[in-house]
Structure formats: structure tokens, C-alpha cells
Image (tube, grey):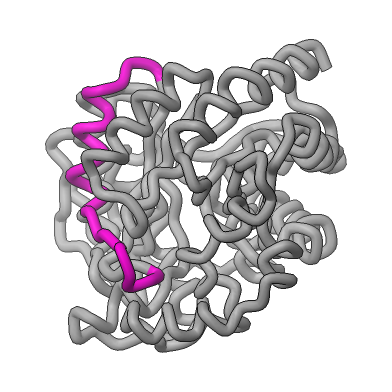
Amino acid sequence: MMLMPLATIRVQSVEIFRSTSNLNRSLRFVLSLVIEFGFYCAHEQYDPVSLLEFAVEAERQNFDTVWSSDHFHPWSHTNAHSGFALSWLGIAAERTKRVKLGSVCPTIMRYHPALIAQAFATLDFMYPGRVFLCLATGEAMNEMPLGLPWPPYQERLSRVRESFEIIRTLWMNEFIDYEGKYYRLRKANLYTKPKSKIPVFMVASGKKSGYVAGYYADGVVVSARVFEQVFLTEVLPALEKGARDAGRDPTRIKKIVHSVVSYDEDLERAIAGCKFWNPTLVPDIFDSDVYDPRELERLGNTVTRETVIEKRFLITTEEEAIERIEKWIKLGVNEVEFLSTSPDQRKFIRFMGGKVIPYIKDTYKNA
């Protein structure tokens, strides 16, 4: 299906933001010359000062990107935190020198996409070429605690589409009028624009979101939790169609897998380390209207040990890590991004950076 324009956009100056690649080339699953590794700083589980330490160490240990969560409420209640991503990212960028940094921001109700455009334009102005943004359809925990409604999925997906249009137009043009179904602009102008092109990714878990990612995004993020079920069969075919309908080359869209991982030489300790994130394994939790972390934690306690073993990336040896990562790479993944819930976070970073990442990069650098 071809997407129809979501809104009337009037701008003072216009640039085209599309690839002109050969559209007759078929989508191929090829090994990228550059395989990147991301470290996910989870504000839900760790305090912002500790996360800064992890980000600095991740850069030192060969990680390429630092991702930040962006939630109002966390996924669990016990020992939880709830740092604010948009203030933390600027500090993290100042503390690091090389890694690219960004956040998964659901522009649904609490954020007008123009504010996200402004925040990330400022970051890129100060740290050009080191900033990325990822859009998603969000969770109830971000909206309902603020007295906001929790829209159905189709509305949230439409809001993401409008967000792509608004954010990119604000970054590239001046004095914009925008008439969307959900968002509007009145002669809006970002006086401080980004210095470089900021990549905008999108989280996808099926055909509908895969199509929108293909139509708009520079990269698609798929959770390892559902990767085996949806990546090849649903997301990639839809992404290819969306890209071609938009006049884009789908092979240029980055493929990223988001993996909740726990590392320890003792398997039982690695399994126990996953407990904080068990609520995300509850069926249909991402579309539910549960937003109280105490209730989320209660639901998470019903998740079985077998489900954790099946759905999580549990690592006890270097070989286990390499085998899983190589499987993803051979399916066309360009970046593996880790949300580590390991018993010892610094130990995980050193393990990956000292052993696994150098091996993978050396093996695939001439692929």
C-alpha cells in the first residue's frame, strides 16, 4: 500500500530528504562492511550517575553507540530509577568523545514532535555527527501517569508518521505551517538547527510498523525478544515495500537488533539478573494500559524461568556471545545494541569490549 500524505506542509524553503539510489535493486541480506555495537543506558534500572560511568566505560571498551531509554515510569518498582533522557544525553555527550548517542523517544502525547526536533537539533549543534534519534509507538507508562490518554495502536503509529514529517521539516526548513490529524505547527522555526544530518530510526515489531520504518526511517530497530518470529517474515518485507513506495533504496536502511542480555559465568546468576525486565515478557504488555510499576512488577513475577531462558540473551562464555551475534549479522543486521541487565554491569562491558567486539569487528571488516 502507498502511504497518503498525512498533512499539508507549507514551508519557506524546501529540500528533498530522499535517497536517489537505484530502485530496481532487490533487497539483499549482505554482511555490512561495518558492524556496530551499542550499549543501552537503562534509566529504569540504574541511577543517572552510574549510567554516565557505564557510557564512558562502553566507549573505552570499543562500543560505537550509547542508547538511552526515555520513560516517565520504569518497568519495575523495586530498586528502580527514572532519570530524564533529554538532560542526561547532553552530559553523556560531554563526558565522551567518540561514541554516537541517542534515545528512543515516543512522540505520542507527552511530547510534541517539535520539542523533540528542538532537543536533538541542539544536541547535534553542540556535538555534530554524534547524535541519532529513534521514534517508537511508546507505552502507557509514559502517558497515563501524566493524566494523558493511552491511544490505540493505529493512532500511535499515525502520530509517529506525523512526527517524522514534522521533525525533519523543522530541521531543514523555516517558518513551517503543518496541518496534521494530531499535530499542528504555526510558522514554526528552529533558529538553532542541527549541523549535520541526524539519523532517525524507528522501532518495528510487525508489518505496519515495518512499512512506516521503510517509508521514513534511516534505520529499523527490532527487539531480540521477537526477532526470530518477525524479522525476516514480517518486518523486512514490509520495510522493503515501504522504502520502494517512498522512492528509497531499502538496502540503505540500517538494521538494528535490540537485545536484553545478561552475562555471568554462572547461568543461574545470569538468569536472576533478568528479573527487573520480566514485565516486558508479559504477553501484550506493550499495548496494555498498565502504567503502575508496582503492577508491572507483579505481572513480571508470573514470568517463568523457561520463558526467560527462551527470550533473553543469556551469556556464560565468549563462544555463546559470538555465535548469537554472528547469526544476526548473517541475517543482515548492521548493529547489535545491548540492554545489559547483568549482575555486574562493568564486568559485562569489559567482557564484550575486550573479547567479543574485537573478534566480530576483525572477522567481518573485509566481508
At x 38% / y 51%, what residue is drawn? 42
Query: In the picture, which quadrant includes the C terminus?
Result: top right
- Determine whether, in the image, residue 320 is placed left or right of residue 253: right
- Determine whether, in the image, residue 146 is placed left or right of residue 316: left
Residue 240 visible, this angle: yes
Q: Is residue 272 above or below residue 125?
A: below
Q: Nearer the viewer, residue 279 or 206?
A: 279
At x 60% / y 49%, what residue is drawn? 261
Query: Does the magenta run of residues contain 87?
Result: yes
Query: At which x and y percent is residue 253?
Result: 64, 40
Q: Nearer the viewer, residue 144 or 320?
A: 320
At x 61% / y 78%, what residue is drawn? 303
Query: In the picture, which quadrant includes the N terminus?
Result: bottom right
At x 82% / y 36%, what residue is drawn? 323
Q: In which image quadrant can residue 298 be found?
A: bottom left
Query: At which x and y percent is residue 169?
Result: 34, 47
Q: In which image quadrant can residue 133 be found?
A: top left
Count all numbered tags in the image, as a single digit: 0
Query: At which x and y percent is residue 348?
Result: 53, 35
Query: Does the magenta run of residues contain 320?
Result: no
Task: Look at the image and give the residue range highlighted in magenta.
Answer: 75-98
Query: At which x and y percent is residue 356?
Result: 68, 25
Q: Is residue 365 above or below residue 264?
A: above
- Determine whether, in the image, residue 156 is placed left or right of residue 18: left
